[in-house]
Image (cartoon, helix red, strand yellow):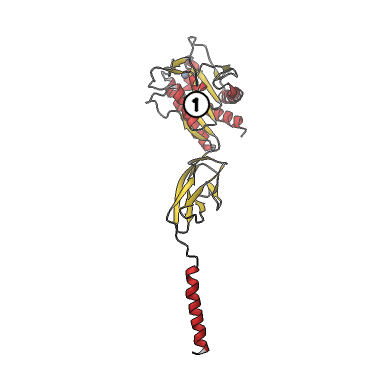
């Protein structure tokens, strides 16, 4: 055998012997998320984790980097409100999960009352033995005939538009007047949404046609349900009421402590109930039905919310 042939045979045999010990990487068949979250507040981070059935390495990416960024090992940073997909990839298999990024601050607005009322009673706060009617009928304009539930919904929708423009996430406890919703249920909407503040919108009524002005109602520190939040509730009430009255030129009746309001007692975040004026006062009723006045009220409330958060 020629020396050259011998060399070739040695090389071939060597390769054949070596080949079976080469690491043959089997393709993972399955990839699943082991750690996910479907809602994240802008500014917060969360680590997503996915695993394959053979522990092969996983990398992560997002569908829209203007809304969120993610590191190769899965730490997502939420930037602004919107919906993104997190994609976990291992070789050519992948899995994805949807994440809703919610705005920096969540404002839950509660347009008081509705055309439909919940019947029966409910506890006035968590663990309360005292019960109260689930909702009340509300007032009605002495001149306009506008129902309080119509006005509060109109104002809430104006506020929603303005607040969303400023980057707030807005949740309404009701979007129409066709459904009944109890006061406790209104607070639960705010609680379930993990809202930062709960702003309840109402219009006042009095047997005296001369009663006028706006006020804000909040729980006292002695409130057994959410008295711990009283200071923040007071600050929120003050910021909103003062800014609103200043902007719209409304008479400011001041802040009042109330511990009997179920919709406020059930709230797990700072809450205020704003009585924007008296529908039983002819002058205020006329004003409340004017678009220009509603816009001023809304603008003032938004300024108050900004001031509360320090924006
Ligand atoms: Zn009311």
Q: Nearer the viewer, residue 239 or 243?
A: 239
Residue 219 in view of the camera: yes
Which class describes the residues within 10 Å of circle 1: few (<14), some (14-19), or many (20+)?
A: many
Q: Nearer the viewer, residue 22 or 224?
A: 22
Q: Residue at x 48, y 9 (%)?
A: 207
Q: Which residue reaches farthest bottom?
A: 2
> Residue 174: x percent and y percent?
43, 28
With respect to residue 61, does 23 lie above or below?
below
Disc 1 residue: CB within 8 Å of ligand 1? no
Residue 141 in view of the camera: no
> Residue 87: x percent and y percent?
48, 51
> Residue 51: x percent and y percent?
48, 51
With respect to residue 40, does 181 lie above or below?
above
Q: Nearer the viewer, residue 113 or 141?
A: 113
Q: Secondary structure at mark 1?
A: helix
Quarter of the image where one finds residue 254: top right
Count of numbered circles on the image: 1
Is 242 displayed left or right of 11 in the figure? Answer: right
Q: Residue at x 51, y 81 (%)?
A: 10
With respect to residue 117, does 165 lie above or below?
below
The quarter of the picture where the C terminus appears is top right
Q: Which residue in the structure is indicated by mark 1?
A: 294
Q: Nearer the viewer, residue 246 or 19?
A: 19
> Residue 27: x percent and y percent?
44, 60
């Amino acid at each position: 055998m020629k020396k050259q042939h011998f060399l070739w045979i040695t090389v071939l045999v060597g390769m054949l012997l070596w080949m079976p010990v080469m690491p043959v990487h089997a393709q993972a068949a399955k990839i699943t998320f082991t750690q996910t979250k479907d809602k994240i507040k802008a500014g917060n981070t969360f680590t997503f984790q996915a695993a394959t059935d053979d522990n092969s390495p996983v990398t992560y990416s997002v569908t829209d980097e203007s809304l969120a960024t993610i590191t190769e090992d899965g730490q997502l940073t939420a930037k602004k409100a919107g919906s993104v997909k997190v994609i976990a990839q291992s070789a050519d298999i992948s899995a994805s999960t949807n994440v809703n990024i919610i705005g920096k601050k969540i404002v839950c607005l509660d347009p008081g009352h509705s055309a439909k009322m919940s019947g029966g009673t409910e506890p006035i706060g968590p663990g309360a033995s005292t019960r109260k009617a689930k909702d009340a009928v509300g007032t009605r304009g002495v001149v306009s005939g506008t129902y309080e539930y119509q006005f509060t919904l109109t104002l809430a929708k104006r506020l929603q538009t303005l607040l969303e423009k400023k980057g707030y996430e807005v949740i309404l406890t009701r979007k129409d007047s066709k459904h009944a919703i109890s006061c406790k249920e209104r607070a639960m909407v705010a609680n379930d949404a993990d809202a930062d503040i709960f702003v309840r919108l109402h219009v006042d009524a009095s047997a005296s046609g001369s009663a006028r002005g706006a006020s804000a109602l909040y729980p006292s520190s002695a409130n057994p349900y959410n008295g711990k939040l009283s200071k923040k509730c007071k600050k929120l009430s003050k910021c909103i009421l003062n800014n609103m009255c200043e902007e719209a030129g409304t008479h400011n009746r001041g802040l009042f402590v109330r511990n009997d309001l179920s919709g406020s007692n059930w709230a797990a975040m700072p809450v205020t109930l704003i009585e924007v004026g008296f529908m039983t006062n002819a002058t205020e009723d006329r004003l409340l039905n004017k678009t220009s006045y509603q816009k001023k009220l809304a603008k003032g409330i938004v300024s108050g919310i900004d001031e509360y958060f320090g924006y």
